[in-house]
Amino acid sequence: MFCYDVAFLIKFGGSIFDFSDYITDWASFGSYFGSITGLLAFLGVLYTVKQSNERADKAETETVKREERDLFFKLLDLHQNKLNAISFQINDSLIYGVDAIKQYAEISNKYIYLYTTYCEILNNKVETFDPFLIEKLKHIFSVYDFNELRLQLSLARVNQKLKLDREVFKNFGSLLEMYTNKAFCSKEIQTKYFTYKYVANMMYKEYGHQTGHYFRNLYYILNTIDGFHLKKEDKEYYAHILRAQFSRFELSLLFFNSISEKSSVEMITLIQKYDMLNSLYYKDIVEFKESTLQNDIYIMFEIRKKERIQ
């Protein structure tokens, strides 16, 4: 700007030491100089407004981040409260929290053994099975021959009323496991999926009043994290903090809940998106293999999502 002013003086004065004697020339110079200083003042105002807006945006962003962080940890506390509220009755006493979840996870696996054994009995000859097991099942279902037992097993399977008998698992648990292992070896992944889904639906039917609120709240937390005004890696950070709170038995039940009829595409998508079953231990669910665990879960989730969409 200084160069322009010098040029203007030279123009009106003839040289830098020979200033004009005409008032009109000085008036023109004043107008010119005033326009320059006005422009500079205007640019200064624009810069100040820009800086102010940037500070306001930054402050607003920091405020939102702080509010979302505070909300997440409040939800984490709520999650713990939901977990602690889950109960399971053993004889005349109640157990709570992770101990209760462990019982539900173990029942899920027992149902897999029972369901698979029922199916095997329905599809094979009596000579295939241990006679003492067959006699025990006859006693449980109050029947006297093998054909009547088959009929009762078929009805129990259809009505989702598998009978958990403590003595059956105490005395014949290894046999049930053997029949299940043998049956699963020849099954395709989709057939295995229907077994797990059957058990998941049974678990929800019998114990959904105890565990349903826990999984509904878990969906709410994941959905809230997904809606945060954060980068992908920051959302994943919060989701992984949540995942770190899960016991192995919670992960097991989360799998079953995810493929039950009560699960939604949105829930499954969030579980996949944030890799919530990454730490699932393959031995915690009957017949999962360590080498194929995550791939099998992915396939089953995709089958379930297609079912829900249809």
Image (spheres, helix red, strand yellow):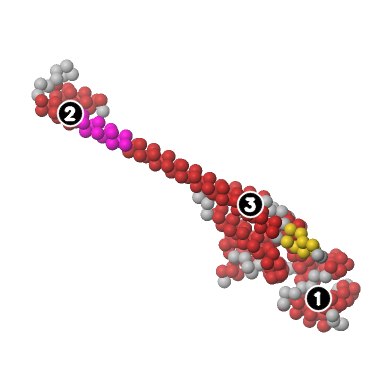
Task: Say few, some or many: other residues with alpha carbon within 10 Å of mark 2 (under 14 / 14 to 19 / 20 or more).
Answer: few
User: As drawn, which residue projects farthest toward the top?
Assistant: 17
Q: Going from the N terminus, do you reach mark 3 or mark 2 first?
A: 2
Label 1 residue SS: helix
Circle 2 sits on which residue?
A: 30
Amino acid identity at mark 3:
Asp
x, y (%) of residue 286?
A: 76, 62
Amino acid identity at mark 1:
Ile
x, y (%) of residue 210?
A: 69, 64
Circle 3 sits on which residue?
A: 77
Amino acid identity at mark 2:
Gly
Extent of the magenta region? 33-45
In the figure, 238 relative to 253: above or below?
above
Marks 3/1 in contact by CB < 8 Å: the verdict is no
Whether residue 201 appears in this view of the structure is yes
Label 2 residue SS: helix
Q: In this image, 230 relative to 56: left or right?
A: right
Circle 1 sits on which residue?
A: 121
Screen quadrant of the C terminus: bottom right
In the figure, 128 relative to 275: above or below?
below
- Within the image, what quadrant is residue 207 found in? bottom right
Task: Say few, some or many: other residues with alpha carbon within 10 Å of mark 3 (under 14 / 14 to 19 / 20 or more).
Answer: few
- Within the image, what quadrant is residue 296 found in? bottom right
